[in-house]
Amino acid sequence: MGLMRDRDPRTNPNKPSATDAELIARARSGDALAEEELVRRHYRSVFCLAYRLTHTYDDAQDIVQDAFIRVHNALPNFRGDSNFSTWVFRIVRNVFLDDQKKRRIRNHASLEEMVELEDSSVARQIEDPQPGPEFLVTRRAQSDLIQQAVMELPEASRLMIALYHFQHKSYEEIAEIMELPLGTVKSRLNRARLALRGRLAASRELLES
Amino acid sequence: MHCERAQEFLSGYVERSLDRPHLAAVEAHLLGCADCRDAVLDLQAIYQSFSRVPAVEPPVDGEWQVIRKLREVRAEDVVNNRHQPALLDWLRSLSPLRAAVSTGLLAMVVLGSYVAGGLGPHIRLDILGISPKSADVPVDYPKPALYVGSNRESNRIDVQIRSTTRIPKSEIAIHWGNTGLIAASESDIAPSSPARLSVPWQSTDLMNAEAVQIEMTAPSLPQPLRYQVVLPARTPRKDGVTVSFFYQSPVEAVRMLAPWLDRPVVLDAELEARVTLQSQGQTVEAALAEIARTIPAKVEVVDGSYRIYR
């Protein structure tokens, strides 16, 4: 009888004996186990980044899934110029930005759409995505404050803030992931932090407590 | 240095990463600019705030969902001829004679399993999604043999999968409906080492199921294998049955136990209301005693399970 094991991947860890580069080489030659080991190895960090960008579990999981499918499709073309982690994060960036673009297009289209009622038509009402006053009053914890402020940043800034402050990536790594010059990354991150400061001005006491 | 220029370097100042000339210029500006000094304090607070944000815990089955999706994508790749699966490669590499012998052996294994397992006449295998569409013995498709039997003595559904080739990391899952996962296991299948999965008939997940789906996935399989097993109609029993008691509510218990008694127990509104009412604040034992009076039935405790019968 085969060795029966718990299916929970967390209780069924694969031995991290092979390097990412070795696993990539095996995966490129069609070794599905090697590809799945890469997923197991990097799932957590990829999910955490996706969650910081979306702040919902479902959306984060969707991004992770799409990202790993893109990894699967792109593996034959992966040249190994950067390490796997950087490459995956770059793919997450693309998935996230594509997704946000689609959402913007949908929202834009729906604003112009007329809703047919029984005897008339009215412009579609779109809920304001900005947090309302009740939300602002009730969010107390510092972490909630900072995370909400990050969510209000433009996508590219949010991405860089998440990479630096949550994923603890260096400026050099972020430059590679974002495919931007190092100086641009530093100045944009500085501007993003100052933007956060502006958004958090009303909560300065709580933040500094 | 004016404020706008100084602010370009405030992150670097907070991180202490400025070179000497810039550091000196920023410090000189800060000495005379209260607004920028405030900005530095705010930035320091923001840096610290990030470190206090709790870590994210990914969903328990998130990793598995991704792997499962990847396997589906690989299966589609096979359909689209993007990759050649190892199993099909192996089969195609066989000479016609060896392929015939292998198929014959596979058939013998399957038939042997059926005979040895004592498959009841009321269990039928429907093979979904792959050819042949329906058959009792899946021998004419190059895939692992599946044996599903009901062991009348232990009242379990036993799934056994044999293969003439090694299939590492085979995931076998029994589902009820589209989402109800009843049991799952992972194993490395080898010719001398079939995978087995066993579920009690009395499992609460199975009590209301007319059929269950058995799915097997593995990295080396070209596509998931899916089987539907129609469960036999439950016959009235007079000898009682040992059940694991999962519910605290007597109403739920009655629902669960009703099929196992010698005639259907109709839960009319009055009975349900009465049992529910009387169960409030009761222990499981007291609730069971109430069930015994209501149905009526005898209740025994056997090795931590409750044996209930008329």
Image: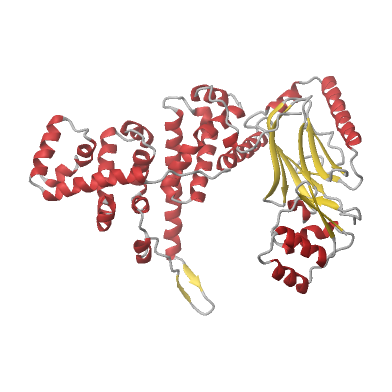
Question: Residue at coordinates 19% horizontally, 48% vertically from top-left?
Answer: B39
The spot of residue A94 in percent (x, y) is 43, 41
Residue furthest to the bottom? A119
Image quarter hosting the N terminus of chain B: top left
Q: Camera-side residue: A113 or B108?
A: B108
Please state the total of marks drawn on the protein image.
0
Instruction: Please determine whether, in this image, residue A28 is positioned above or below residue A65.
Output: above
Instruction: Please determine whether, in this image, residue A110 is positioned above or below residue B18.
Output: below
Q: Specify the quadrant of the image occupied by residue A83.
A: top left
Answer left or right for B61 relative to B167. Answer: left
Q: Camera-side residue: B39 or B310?
A: B310
Q: Camera-side residue: B9 or A121?
A: B9
Answer left or right for A100 relative to B230. Answer: left
Asked whether residue B50 is in view, the answer is yes
The spot of residue A22 in percent (x, y) is 52, 21
Instruction: Please determine whether, in this image, residue B189 is positioned above or below residue A49.
Output: above
Question: Residue at coordinates 49% horizontally, 23% vertically from top-left?
Answer: A21
Image quarter hosting the C terminus of chain B: bottom right
Q: Specify the quadrant of the image occupied by residue A93.
A: top left
The spot of residue B212 in percent (x, y) is 77, 48
Asked whether residue B223 is in view, the answer is no
Answer left or right for B199 relative to B309. Answer: left
Question: Residue at coordinates 27% horizontally, 57% vertically from top-left?
Answer: A203
How is the protein colored in the picture? secondary structure
The spot of residue B171 in percent (x, y) is 68, 36
Instruction: Please determine whether, in this image, residue A16 is positioned above or below residue A9.
Output: above
Answer left or right for B24 relative to B94. Answer: left
